[in-house]
Image: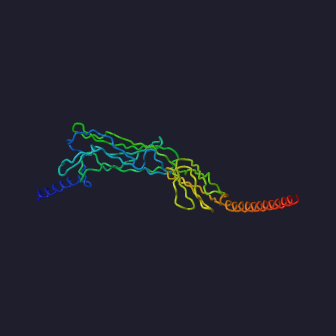
Amino acid sequence: MKRTISLVMISILLLLILFGQFDNGVVATQDWPDPPFSTPSHQPPFIEILNLSENQIVNSNSLNVRFIVTKPSSWISGPTMTWITPGYICWGKINYISYTLDGIQSDMISANDPTELGLRVYSSSPSRVMDFSLNLTGLSDGVHSIRVSAEAECLYCEGHAWLSNFVVGNSSEVTFIVDTGPPIITLVSPISKEYNTTNVSLCYLVSEPSEVTYSLDGLANVTLLGNITLSNLTVGAHSLTIFALDAAGNVAFDSIEFSVAESESRVFSLPLFVAIFCVLLVIGCFSVAFFLSRKRRYTQTASCFFRCR
């Protein structure tokens, strides 16, 4: 009876020892007697900033910077057989991240890397990519630079011992520009007045490189590459709006109202022609009448002169 009880207790103890090594599918065995792999050459992690490119222009004083830290493939070895299941050796884990904004270093931030160093049992190879984000606020307009860094703890072997005091890190830096102010655009011509021509110059000034368009009388926007002439305008009132869109997405505009009247040449050409024609006709008629009158008088005088002789 005692032997049976002893056997049952030993069996239970063995089961507890066996299953007690599992924690969410991970075997927590840091004390393997002999490391099954030689120490790899430890490369630093690779850091990539996802939503900022070099010299990118943003139009906000607050910015969420996303970046990923990728562990080198050499940081994970396996799978290899443990006592009962395939296992992987994790040679490195990310401990801290930090950033430097315009030369000012932030505090170290825990990376919360779930990877455990050493030989572990995983259902598949542990992920090598970690995603992070930083919220930057109070950014002033102008040029800024940010460098994000990651610090890792790496495992290596010396003889038959696991050692984990090897630290490796890397960083990535990018320069960006904050521009929250819209460009300044000014219409030089036309001005608010009445024009006696159907061709009016469109001239403008803009304070920074921008995409410039205009809309005449509410019609679709037309791209401008420089000053132009608005040709064949209809007689009457017109409204003109000019827009400037800078590289950061800030928009500015300027508007003007003006009118076009009948040109003097068009207004007075026909009446003037009729008036001149009438004047010339009257003068011609008087001239002919005068000429005929003088000719008749001269003829009568000459006849009397010859009769008297």
Give x and y (percent) for residue 303.
Answer: 84, 60
For this orientation, the residue located farthest to the right is 308
Give x and y (percent) for residue 232.
Answer: 58, 58
Observer-nearest residue: 294 or 82?
Answer: 294
Observer-nearest residue: 266 or 230?
Answer: 266
Residue at 51 percent across and 54 percent down: it is 223
The quadrant in which residue 307 appears is: bottom right
Specify the quadrant that holds the N terminus.
bottom left
The quadrant in which residue 286 appears is: bottom right
Specify the quadrant that holds the C terminus.
bottom right
Left or right placement of residue 187 versus residue 74 in this view = right
Residue at 78 percent across and 59 percent down: it is 291
The quadrant in which residue 73 appears is: top left
Residue at 59 percent across and 55 percent down: it is 254
For this orientation, the residue located farthest to the top is 159
Left or right placement of residue 283 versus residue 148 in this view = right
Badge count: 0
Give x and y (percent) for residue 4.
Answer: 11, 58
Residue at 48 percent across and 50 percent down: it is 58
Observer-nearest residue: 50 or 280?
Answer: 280
Observer-nearest residue: 287 or 231?
Answer: 287
Give x and y (percent) for residue 90.
Answer: 27, 46
Left or right placement of residue 259 versus residue 60 in this view = right
- Colour pattern: rainbow
